Image (cartoon, rainbow, N blue to C red):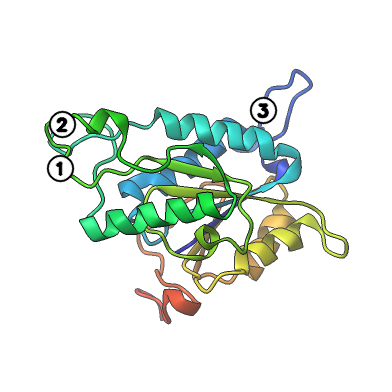
Amino acid sequence: GKGANIIFADATVRSSSGSNDNDDDGHTLEEIIADGVYSCMENSGQSCNAPTRMLVEESIYEEAVEIAARVAKSLRVDSGMERGDHLGPVVSQDQYDRIQGYIQKGLDEGARLVAGGLGQPANMRQHAHSFGYYVQPTVFADVLPTMTIARHEIFGPVLSILKFTTGVTRSATDEAIAMANDTPYGLTNYVYSTDPARLRKCARMLRSGMVELNGVGLSGDSPFGGMKASGNGREGGR
């Protein structure tokens, strides 16, 4: 749990016209951020390998926050009885209450709410199936590594966005790695960059069972497992 999605400023190549254009894989910043939001919110956030912490380099941070908020607000929440692509409810009343408690904790500790929030989505309050445990897709910005929502496994559609930059004695890469590793969990981390050396260093130094680079997922026969509180050993490993 608490997977970090590290997005470096060089994840995309910005053209002189101001648009994002990555010549290597075609990713734009919009696509990278949107993919991060979708991956966090998938299955209503009830995924062990969800990238629930988005770590963004300072120079692209505010743009990333704006995109993440817009994407989260565009997500539809509805009953599983309805057709189409949308988020359904979380598993139980206990889990709903737990998620609401974490959202309140984020507000209390000073994180900036940019999408979603407390209570059910407005469209579900009068819905025929509103007895389900529906949670608003929620995004917090300006999250600090010490905040509860950055450290605890929420297991719901709640994304925390944190900023990193070049430190006094460490590079931006080292700062991002240290921030990503500052968790008791270690299942999956994600990295976006166009610098091969940086990608290799992150893959080597991130303390998680799996590291996905530039949106390339694991193959079906890859070993699956974690480190620290995310488990020992690998399913399918040797």
Q: Where is residue 191 in the image (x, y as percent from the top left)?
A: 60, 53
Q: How crowded is mark 2: few (under 14 residues within 10 Å), some or many (20 or more)?
A: few
Determine contact: label 3, label 2, CB under 8 Å: no
Q: Taking the image as drawn, is residue 187 in sight?
A: yes
Q: Name the residue: 49% across, 42% down.
A: 139
| Residue sitting farthest toward the right | 168
Q: Which is more N-terminal, label 2 or label 1?
A: 2
Which residue lies under the disc numbered 2?
82
Q: Position of residue 214 (x, y in %)?
A: 57, 47
Q: Which of marks 1 and 3 is in front?
A: 1
Amino acid at the residue labelled 3 = Asn
Q: Which is more N-terminal, label 3 or label 1?
A: 3
| SS category of the residue bearing label 3 | loop
Q: Which is more N-terminal, label 2 or label 3?
A: 3
| Residue sitting farthest toward the front | 108
The relative height of residue 113 versus residue 228 in the rendered view (above or below) is: above
Q: Which of marks 1 and 2 is in front?
A: 1
Which residue lies under the disc numbered 1?
131
Query: From mark 1 to mark 2, how far is it between C-alphas?
Result: 15 Å
Which residue lies under the disc numbered 3?
20
Please tell me which residue lies in front, 47 or 122.
122
207 left or right of 102?
Answer: right
Q: Name the residue: 60% across, 50% down.
A: 110
Amino acid at the residue labelled 2 = Glu
Quadrant where the C terminus is found in the figure: bottom left
Amino acid at the residue labelled 1 = Phe
The relative height of residue 150 versus residue 224 in the rendered view (above or below) is: above
Number of marks present in the image shown: 3
Quadrant where the N terminus is found in the figure: bottom left
| SS category of the residue bearing label 1 | loop
Q: Where is residue 192 in the image (x, y as percent from the top left)?
A: 62, 48
| SS category of the residue bearing label 2 | loop
